[in-house]
Amino acid sequence: MKNMKVFITRKIPQDGIDILKKEKLEIEIFPYDRPPTKEEIIRGVKDANALISLLTDKIDREVIDSAPELKVIGNYAVGYNNIDVEYTKKKGIVVVNTPGVLTDATADLTFALLLSAARRVVEGDKFMREGKFKGWAPMLLLGKDIWGATIGIIGAGRIGQAVAQRAKGFHMKILYYSRRRKIDFERETDAKFVSLETLLKEADFITIHTPLTKETYHLLGEREFRMMKEGAILINTSRGEVVDENAMLKALKSGKLFAAGLDVFHGEPHVNPELFELTNVVLTPHIGSATETTRRKMAMMVCSDVLRVLCGEEPENRVV
Ligand code: NAP
Ligand code: GLV
Ligand code: GLV
């Protein structure tokens, strides 16, 4: 391990760093509380054997080519659409991520957005703070029922299935669309495997849990929004680019969508300012995995796996 260098693009929880510190490694952590620029990433990786990146770091060919000693990239996230994995594969660089440990935290946030959007929690909070509350009123901030409603889960992987568990507790009818049918999942949750079209036509709540890939880019566009039920609610905690944001904005303005709950945005960190004008959207700043325990586990997971690769062992969470 001597003379090996790990570059980390941002301070991550100490529990992870401590794992690296047990070895005789040079550890360089980008010192500022902001994402590094491409030039700053290149400066950090040019003599590094390992890179620990965040989902906000674009690890493209140029970055990879600037790091001739690079053996492993540990992405501090489960999603790895920020990394050109076809190119790392070609170059023999191992990529690892943090699956599983963030599943429940992200499923919980998905449900928080679902409940907030349906029951207008954020609008209600604003109403109170503005001093508008004049007492209980028969028609004040009427929302949508959750108990017994139909939820459509797009992408029944770890997080999608964890959302279904929560939906079951709310007595919801569960529909799902994924690449493959999952019999065990169906047995556990009574979920029904349907086409995307059926899901869009029948669901009161639509929630997206696919990764961002070439196939899922704009999976929900004008055509798909047209198929949705009048007054449906859309939740997105996957990646902003899975949804055509202009088509979603149109649906939110026309009332086709009753509301949306969004943790992710097209072209983050940019957020389309039109979203701020709408009262029927609940916005959170990409905090799906943001609990103290989860972030600690992610740090330990990614650092342990990076070490494994540096030691010549097989990592636990290899992406490619
Ligand atoms: P996962 O276990 O890999 O699940 C993703 C599922 O999406 C897979 O089961 C796959 O279905 C399905 N899928 C992939 N391509 C598809 C397609 N073209 N059409 C339909 N379904 C497709 O991943 P995960 O751990 O649940 O995470 C999912 C995503 O959530 C991540 O990639 C990340 O982008 C996002 N995420 C966001 C946050 C946040 O902070 N908001 C936190 C964590 C994760 P099959 O199994 O049928 O092949
Ligand atoms: C967060 O978005 C992740 O992919 O872990
Ligand atoms: C509402 O507060 C009720 O009592 O119905």
Image (cartoon, helix red, strand yellow):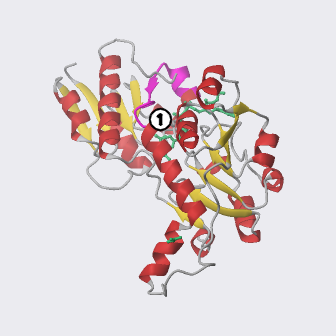
Location of residue 296 in the rendering, given as x and y in whole percent from the top left corner? 29, 38
The residue tagged with tag 1: helix, strand or loop? loop
Q: Amino acid at mark 1?
A: Val
Task: Look at the picture and state if 235 lies above or below 121.
Answer: above
Question: Which stretch is magenta?
Answer: 86-102
Q: Quadrant of the N terminus?
A: top left
Location of residue 236 in the rendering, given as x and y in whole percent from the top left corner? 59, 50
Q: Taking 25 as reference, is 185 left or right?
A: right
Q: Which residue is mark 1?
A: 78
Between 20 and 16, the residue placed more toward the observer is 16
Q: Residue 99 magenta-drawn?
A: yes
> Visible in this render: residue 205?
yes
In the rendered image, which quarter is residue 50 located in? top left
Q: Taking 223 as reference, is 15 left or right?
A: left
**Residue sitting at 43 percent across and 26 percent down?**
96
Q: How many marks?
A: 1
Between 201 and 171, the residue placed more toward the observer is 171
> Visible in this render: residue 271?
no
